Every structure is written in structure tokens, then in C-alpha cells.
Amino acid sequence: MYEGKIIKFYRKKAKLTQEQLGKGVCSVTHISKIERGLTEYSPEITILLSKRLKINIEKELANLTNLKIKLDYWHEVIISQNMQEALRIYKELANNKLFEISEHIIYYDLLKAKYYLRQGDTKKAQKLIEQIQLNPNNLSVYETNLFKHILGLYYMSIDEHIKSIDIFNSIDYKNYSNPSVYYDLGAAYHNVHSPVLAYYYAEKALNYFKTTNHFLRIIDTENFMLIQVESDQYRNFKNTIEQYENLIKLCDLCNASDKKAKVLHNFAYEHLRRKKYQIAGRLYKESMELKDNKSTLYLLSLEGYISSGFKGKFLPKEELLRLVNEGMTIATENNEALYKVIFTLHQFSILQQEESYYSYLINNVLPYFKSHGYTMIAQSYDRDLYNYYIRIGNMEKALEIADIIINNELED
């Protein structure tokens, strides 16, 4: 059967008619039956047709029958976050002509969509998702649930986290044995400020990653779980330090510099919020050194480093302004409006321009944060604004902000 599909594929590719292909070998009727898998045929005929088509039929047959194995391996590599190997396989599969006649073409498109989402290429993923949605009945039970997983990831990527949670929860886990989806569900709950559920699902994912020795995913998941437990103000910080240090060692053992950068950044933040500014600054700087200094991820740690240096008073004014200018340049090049707003605020703070700072905060920053869904950041600046109004004696405005803060806390 597969031989017939391959012969038909390469005949059409060579722009030959059935008569031209079979001339001197067999009849048009026989060629037609071979291509449709309706007749038995001798190996000699296959060899003669293959030579005429200039293909190695055994090699092509092995290629076609092994596509499912290659796709499963690619899926496993994507799950394990070995993106270098995932890229290699992506390129290899992209050059495989036989997908056009394979029964696994939908599975291939699904995995491509998942790969694009893991790479942050939402537009390419969206295009494939829309294409797959045109014929949902063509999906197998497994593919239907894989598609739900991909849809959940897509909605997370466009910040529709409630929708992503609903989709993740609709997955039939009996027919979709991929516990890595628990990590994604945990991340979705984290994004709607539900640390208990985020931790619960992350722990389910961690058990799977440990069983399968997915060390890169173990690092990510334990790092993620630490973020959840740090919402507990009574947690012993010594335990936190020990866990972060162990994660950093694991990153070094796995030679995972990108994971280490994330762990260092989160470790720095835990010191920053405890007002341990110099340690936070050192950790932020270590994280920055492991990142592309033109990337958005670099800006994230640079902003933390500036905050630590300013609040801890261990960086001079000139150096702080230089860092702010560096951040503004990178944010402009990357079209990152959020960081342009934040670095402008830092500049006003460093120059001690209080009136300009609060005017910009009220008229530009808070409206931007709230309109773009940055509710957690907005809440921290609401508190800053409340303290300012109390300090200048404007009790009416202070009460307005206090009412906003209280309502936000009740909603959380």
C-alpha cells in the first residue's frame, strides 16, 4: 500500500502520466491498481518503476513508515525543552517531502504549532490553529486533546488566562498521557493569582519530570513552585535560600545557562522584596551576564538591578542614569512600551523630581498598566501613590486610592 502511495507521489512530481511510467513495464490499469493499493505486484516491477522515477523505494518506504516515530520523538524533545535538538528535527522534518501523502500530516501541523508557541512565534502558531479548526472532525482522540493543549498555550500567550484554564480543564487525560500539561495549567493559575492551584498542578508535573529525568523541566518547575510558596510571608527564608542554591547547582550540572538566568533573577527578587539590596543587586547582575543584552529578558533583570542599586544606595547617581539610558535604548529598539514607562519613572526618582514622578505616574503609568492588564504592578504603584497623598496631606485623594487598594485585595 505504502509503495503505491510513494510511486504515485513521485510520478506526479516527475509530471509523468501512468502510461509514461508503465511503458515497457506494465499496463496503465496495473499502474493505477498499484497506486491505489488494489493489487499484488512483483518486486521486479517495483524496482523497474523506482529506477524510472530515480528513487530508492526501500529508503522512501522506511522514511514514510518512520514518520510517526520521528514525530513522537520531536514531541518528546519539545516537552523536555531541548530546543537545540527540537530545531534540528524541525529542519529535518521540513525537508521531508512525504508528509504530503502521510496519514500523520495533522499530527505534524499540531506539533509545528506547539513548537512555534514554545519559540514565542504566536503568529505562525495562530495560522496553523486556524487551519486545523477548519476540519476538527479529522482529528483523532489523541490529536483532539493535543489540540486543546495547544489552544490553552495559545490563549496563555495572548494573556487570556481564564480561557486557557477552561480549555486545559476540558482535556481528557485518560486519552492524552502528557502530564507536562499540568505545568502549563499551573502557569495559567499563577497568571490569575491562584498560588495554591498553581503549586498543586506544578507538583503533579514535577513528579512526572522526575520520573522521566527531564532535568531542564525539573529546574523550571521547582523554580516556579518556589515563586508560589514565597507568597507565604511566614516561610523560613533559609529554606528558600537552600532551594535556590540547589537549583543553581543543577543548572550548572545541566549546563543550562538560560535556566540559571531565570533562577538567579527570581532569587534576586526574593532578596529585593526583603530589602537585602546588595545581595539582590549581585544576583540581578549575574542574571544579566547570562542573557542577551539586547533582549526583553535582559531588561527584566536590568530593571531589578537599577531598583536594588537605587534603594540600597550602592550605585552612584551617574551609574544609575547610565543604566536607565541603556534600558531606554534597548526598550525602544525592542518596541517595549512597558519598560520605557518604567525606566522613565526610574529616571524621575534618581533625579529626585518628585512632582514630575507623580504627575507621570498618575497621567501615564497607571492608566497604561491598567489598560494593558498589568494589575499586580499597578497595585504596587497604587500603594506608592497612597503614601504620597498621605505625605502631602491630600486625604481626599488618599481615601480614593485606599478604596481601590481594598477592592483589589478583596477581589484577590
Image: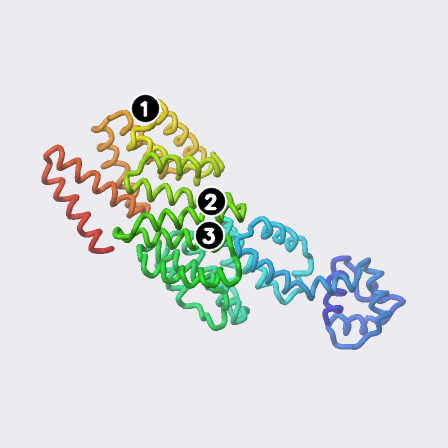
- The residue drawn where x is 53% and y is 54% is 115
Q: Position of residue 192 (x, y in %)?
A: 32, 55
Residue 29 vs residue 264, the one in the foreground = 264
* Number of the label disc, if any, that sits on residue 317: 1
Left or right placement of residue 23 versus residue 272 in this view: right
- The residue drawn where x is 57% and y is 63% is 107
Look at the numbered disc 3 and give the secondary structure of its residue.
helix
Q: Where is residue 330 in the image (x, y as percent from the top left)?
A: 43, 33
Alpha carbon separation for disc pair 3 and 2 = 9 Å
Q: Earlier in the sequence, mark 2 or mark 1?
A: 2
Identify whether 91 is placed above or below 142: above
In the image, farthest residue toward the top: 318
Disc 1 residue crowd, few under 14, some 14–19, many 20+, Cα 10 Å: some
Would you say the residues marked 2 and 1 are in contact, meaning their CB atoms lie under 8 Å apart? no
Residue position marked by numbered label 3 in the rendering: 219
- The residue drawn where x is 11% and y is 36% is 394
In the picture, residue 331 is in which quadrant? top left
Which amino acid type corresponds to the residue marked 3 in the rendered image?
A: Ile
Which amino acid type corresponds to the residue marked 2 in the rendered image?
A: Lys
* Number of the label disc, if any, that sits on residue 192: none
Alpha carbon separation for disc pair 3 and 1 = 37 Å
In the picture, residue 366 is in which quadrant? top left
Residue position marked by numbered label 2 in the rendering: 260
Q: Position of residue 119 (x, y in %)?
A: 51, 49
Would you say the residues marked 3 and 1 are in contact, meaning their CB atoms lie under 8 Å apart? no
Look at the numbered disc 1 and give the secondary structure of its residue.
helix
